[in-house]
Amino acid sequence: MALIKKFKIESYKTSEPIVELKNISVFYNKRQIIDNLNLKINKQEILGMLGPNGVGKSTIFNLITGLKNPNYGEIFIDGIKSTKLPINERFTKFKLGLVPQYGGLIHDLALYDNLKLVSEIHIKNKELREHKLNKLISQFEFESLLKVKSKNLSGGQKKKLVIAMALINDPKILLLDEPFAALDILTIKMLQEIILNLQASEEISIVVCDHQARDLLNCVDRAIILSNGKIIASGSPSEVISNKEAKTMYFGDEFNIS
């Protein structure tokens, strides 16, 4: 895999949104989590979400997937109002892919059997199914791990497997929840490379939510900083780092990604 670039290839970026959250407010037991939030996620963009615990990052993922409906506001996916569409319809109609922070695989099944199980759900044609499996095995360099039970894989190998499983239905939008959590430096670098390569080769819009701010900012086109249910900063990694409110509420004065 190529080394991580400190720049993003401009041709991958468009200003055409694939997801729009308009005037979204969300309450949990009368506590407001999201406060009149507006957010656009552009096609083929890698967007990073940062912020302290409890500011609404996971809630935004839940809004996109349909796990949570907003109390106010509207959700549009690929230009279609989707606020009240059920989860299964969103995943199939708009080809969503979700990589959860925990789980996502069957630990007593071998790596190959996890891939095969998901492929049988999404791809009915056997020949196409085999083609997709072989492509993912090669793409993620799984050849030597196919018969290894998932519970015996390393943390990085498990994360790669869950990402590969999420790619089986050729998603247009891939949501990554805490992909860098509890991983070593080399494994994080490997995952950053995977994310950048997916943007380039698969033309996917990717949203990454993580507490590892430096690791996240090294692989995104744009980042948003959330605080008290609002977006307090949005822009390139260098722009959000230099934002005064983001420094006060999240980064602090000494943070950098160099």
Image: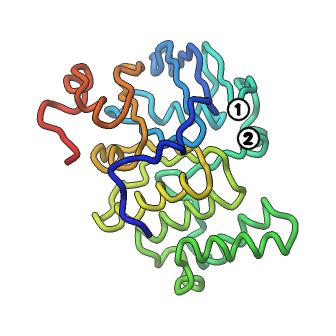
Q: Is residue 187 above or below residue 144?
A: above
Q: Position of residue 180 (x, y in %)?
A: 37, 55
Seen at 78% across and 41% down, the residue is 93
Seen at 38% across and 29% down, the residue is 235
Q: Residues within 10 Å of mark 2 (few under 14, many from 20)?
A: some
| Tag 2 secondary structure | loop
For label 1, the residue is: 78
Residue closest to the eye, 41 or 201: 201
Q: Position of residue 205 (x, y in %)?
A: 58, 43
Q: Position of residue 234 (x, y in %)?
A: 39, 26
Q: Is residue 33 above or below residue 179?
A: above
Question: Residue 183 — which label?
Answer: none
Name the kind of residue labelled 2 in the image: Phe
Q: Residues within 10 Å of mark 1 (few under 14, many from 20)?
A: some
Question: Residue 94 — which label?
Answer: 2
* CA separation in Å, label 1 and label 2: 7 Å
Residue closest to the eye, 79 or 161: 79
The mark nearer the N terminus, 1 or 2, is 1
Which quadrant would residue 124 be assigned to in this image?
Answer: bottom right
Q: Is residue 251 above or below residue 193?
A: above
